[in-house]
Image (cartoon, rainbow, N blue to C red):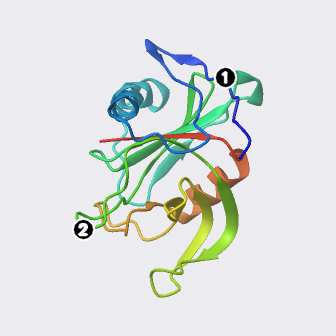
Amino acid sequence: MKKLALALALVSSCAFMAPPAAALETYEAKMEASDAASQARIDMLEAFGPKRLKPGQYVWRDVPASAGQERVVVSLSDQMAYLYRGSEMMAATTVSSGADKTPTPTGIFAVLNKKPMHRSRKYDNAPMPHAQFIDQYGVALHAGFNPGRPASHGCVRLPASFAKKLFTVTDLGTPVYIGA
């Protein structure tokens, strides 16, 4: 696999590392992802004001491509995902992550594969529209039911219209930080 060499911008006081060619689930990577999730909560307030999103809702604003590379930050404790372009928050959405028996992994990942429509081989041919795979085990960001709580088999389910937009702005190698 080719090594990914994307330089990431500084976001406030957090310095983000380059995305891995394979998932990083070390203690340090998990702490970095949790720090990114904490910072995203603050950045959302600055970008969108004091909004509280209900399950299935999202906010999105235009940020020019010249602002920098995209990255996704997921906060499992808040059941939220955030999209950055450079140091600017571009979007935020509610998510549904893995349930207790099938938790979503934490750490630093990268988009390894993208499929406009995928069907799960593990879970009864379940549809996974706008799937962006982040590990070799089938964990992905994709459109799916969003009840406002962890309910997936480990994937990060996104509102359908958000997943479609996200799919169009990310590339292979886009970093994905998943923090507790």
For the C terminus, the quadrant is top left
Against 42, residue 158 (above or below) is below
On the image, numbered disc 2 is attached to which residue? Answer: 101
Q: Find the distance from the CA under tag 1 to the CA under tag 2.
A: 35 Å
Q: Position of residue 133 (x, y in %)?
A: 58, 58
**Residue occupying the point 64% across, 52% down:** 112
Residue 116 placement: quadrant: bottom right
Question: Looking at the rendered structure, which numbered label has been put on residue 7?
Answer: 1
User: For this rendering, which residue is in front, 24 or 123?
Assistant: 24
Which element carries disc 2, helix, strand or loop? loop
Q: Residue furthest left?
A: 100
Q: Residue furthest front?
A: 1
User: For this rendering, which residue is in front, 142 or 22?
Assistant: 22
Against 97, residue 66 (above or below) is above
Which element carries disc 1, helix, strand or loop? loop
Question: Label 2 sits on what residue type?
Answer: Lys
Q: Position of residue 85 (x, y in %)?
A: 63, 30
Q: How many marks?
A: 2
**Residue occupying the point 37% across, 36% down:** 26
Could you classify mark 1 by the number of other residues whose Cα lies within 10 Å: few (under 14), some (14-19), or many (20 or more)?
few
